[in-house]
Amino acid sequence: MNEDAALLDLRRRAHDGAPQALYQLASALVARHELDEAFTLHRRAAEAGLANAQIEYARMLMYGVGCDAEPVRAAEWLLRAESAGSPIASYFLALMSLGGRTLPRDGRINERVLRAVRADYPPALRAAAVHFGRKADPADQLRCLQLLERGAGLGDVVAARLLVERMRRGEGDTPQPEAAADLRAQLQAIGIGPLPEIVVPDYAPNASAPGVLSMEDVLQPVALTAQSARPNVATVDGLLSAEECRLLIANAQTHLQRSRTVDPETGLPFEQEIRTSSDAAFDAILEDLALRCVQLRMASAAGLPLDHAEHLVVLRYEPGQEYRPHRDYRPPSSIERDRPDAGNRLRTICVYLNTVEAGGQTEFPVAGLKVEPRPGRAVVFENLHADGTPDPDSLHAGLPVERGEKWLATLWLRQAPYRRF
Ligand SMILES: O=C(O)CCC(=O)C(=O)O
Ligand SMILES: [Fe+2]
């Protein structure tokens, strides 16, 4: 059956309003980006009590897909699905609660993640694996491996890639080069190549007790080292673990495109020679719990709540590629087009994700400062003066990569909330 005939068939079956048929039709319409109709159909199936539809409807409300974002209503629908027994609803409630805006950060976050882990929901397995992977206790390291294995076994390609790296390197257990090579070959067969070699020598393991899942660990304060007062630049080593760096790269690889910048005249994005990297911008709807945790860690190192952040961007520079001197604050025309209430870009945090063979430093010419890329290291800087006006001294550049490649994760944080949850 071709696509249109399949859709026609779904329409015919949904005609009498059976919730499962409405849900299936709505899901097919989402895949075809026919979002307004999908939204209405998911709502009807949700109202008829179908838990999967309640979750999809809630997700559309959460992210503002096919509608205006209404996180409070999204949470209400998730609570309904959760009380009907859905562990996936619990997972999304945990994801929302961690943001701390729509739902409180209470003791239920971990309980909810655990419920989704026990139900073998792959995104929950992945997030829990990355969490336990940051704990020093050998039992937690083993737990991380087991969770990655479960996820990989259920078809989670990112979990499989993280697992390969651990097995090859003997992270968390003795090295298993043959099993790693087997799994790598399976991934290669579906077109997925190896991740860069990443070691973070100096990251601080999570401080929470061994064996305990404590997702709020990502909010722990970190001590920054001042590098310059004018402009205000600080760094912290080992903010992200090797696994978190790999997670970002693995997620970004499938979404890379040529980087663009904003035209100061029109406020519209365009390609130009100032920025020659490729990047992946993570739309809110691409964000899962593991990615959200990494972003929370970054925002909290930058001293601001995650809801001040624009979308996460992961950049890849190849030899010769660079980001020429620029400032991150945006021209008024561009702010007007994109959430003016959130104000301008107050602060930037960039985390280096891999070892660059040569080049690729972040340079702040006014301070005469060059920050060396090193996996897990973050650089945080102010783009505005204390009174909120643009600080031209915040000029900075990603120097050309000379050898190897450079992967970088950036969050631009606005003066006021930008995200809805
Ligand atoms: O590549 C770098 O080191 C700097 C990146 C940067 O300036 C940005 O993402 O805004
Ligand atoms: Fe920048």
Image (cartoon, grey):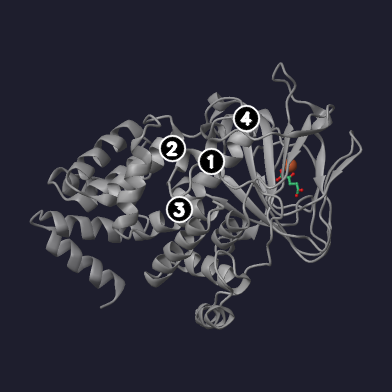
**From mark 3 to mark 4, how far is it between C-alphas?**
23 Å
**From mark 2 to mark 1, how far is it between C-alphas?**
10 Å
Circle 3 crowding by C-alpha within 10 Å: few under 14, some 14–19, many from 20: many
Residue type at mark 4: give it. Answer: Gly
Give 165 or 101, whichever is nearer the viewer.
165
Residue drawn at 52 percent across, 77 percent down:
187
Upstream in sequence: badge 2 or badge 4? 2
Comparing labels 2 and 1, the label whose residue is closer to the camera: 1
Give 383 or 212, whichever is nearer the viewer.
212
Residue situated furthest left in the rendering? 16
Circle 1 crowding by C-alpha within 10 Å: few under 14, some 14–19, many from 20: many
Residue tagged 1: 218
Residue tagged 4: 303
Upstream in sequence: badge 3 or badge 4? 3
**From mark 1 to mark 4, how far is it between C-alphas?**
13 Å
Residue type at mark 1: give it. Answer: Val
Residue 150 position in % (x across, y down): 39, 67
Residue drawn at 58 percent across, 46 percent down:
312
Upstream in sequence: badge 3 or badge 1? 3
Label 2 C-beta lies within 8 Å of the nearest ligand 1 atom: no
Residue tagged 2: 98
**From mark 3 to mark 2, how far is it between C-alphas?**
13 Å
Upstream in sequence: badge 2 or badge 1? 2
Residue type at mark 2: give it. Answer: Leu
Residue drawn at 49 percent across, 34 percent down:
419
Upstream in sequence: badge 3 or badge 2? 2
Give 400 or 181, whichever is nearer the viewer.
181
Callout 2: SS: helix
Residue tagged 3: 127
